[in-house]
Image: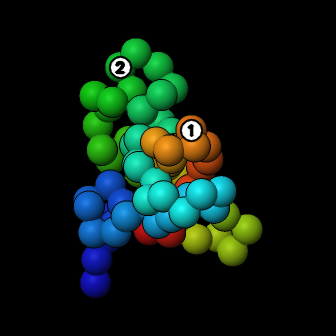
Amino acid sequence: MFLGCPLCNGVTTPGPCEICGTPMEDLGMVEDYAGPYSPYQDGELIELEHKRNHKSTLICIHLIYCPTCKYDDYLEVPI
């Protein structure tokens, strides 16, 4: 069984842009943008900060971006 975020670990990719169809780029976890030292935070603490969705599934929230049309969005990845 795989534990951890498949997008963080490079197992999956975000998929196509819903506006233009270009492959979206992963800009990392939303937690990385929370403060100046967030990218250096301990991985175990980050797991505790992950949110649970309406089905009580642990999720990792990523910022994704389209380089063609400049569209950005959040992607909730089940862990």
At x 29%, y 37%, the residue is 42
Is residue 19 toward the left or the right of residue 34 in the image? Answer: right
Q: Which mark is residue 12?
A: none
Is residue 76 toward the left or the right of residue 47 in the image? Answer: right
Residue type at mark 2: give it: Tyr
Q: What residue is pinned by disc 2?
A: 37
Residue type at mark 1: give it: Lys
Does residue 40 appear in this view? yes
Q: CA distance from mark 2 to mark 1?
A: 27 Å
Location of residue 21 (image quadrant): bottom right
Location of residue 72 (image quadrant): top right
User: Which quadrant of the rendered structure holds the N terminus?
Assistant: bottom left
Q: What residue is pinned by disc 1?
A: 70
Residue at the bottom extreme of this rendering = 1
At x 57%, y 43%, the residue is 69
Across and down, in percent, residue 56 comes to 64, 70
The answer to which of 63 and 66 lies nearer the viewer is 66
**Label 1 Cα crowd, 10 Å radius (few <14 / some 14-19 / many 20+):** few
The local secondary structure at tag 1 comes to loop
Across and down, in percent, residue 58 comes to 53, 65
Across and down, in percent, residue 45 comes to 38, 41
Does residue 59 appear in this view? no
Relative to 25, residue 34 above or below: above
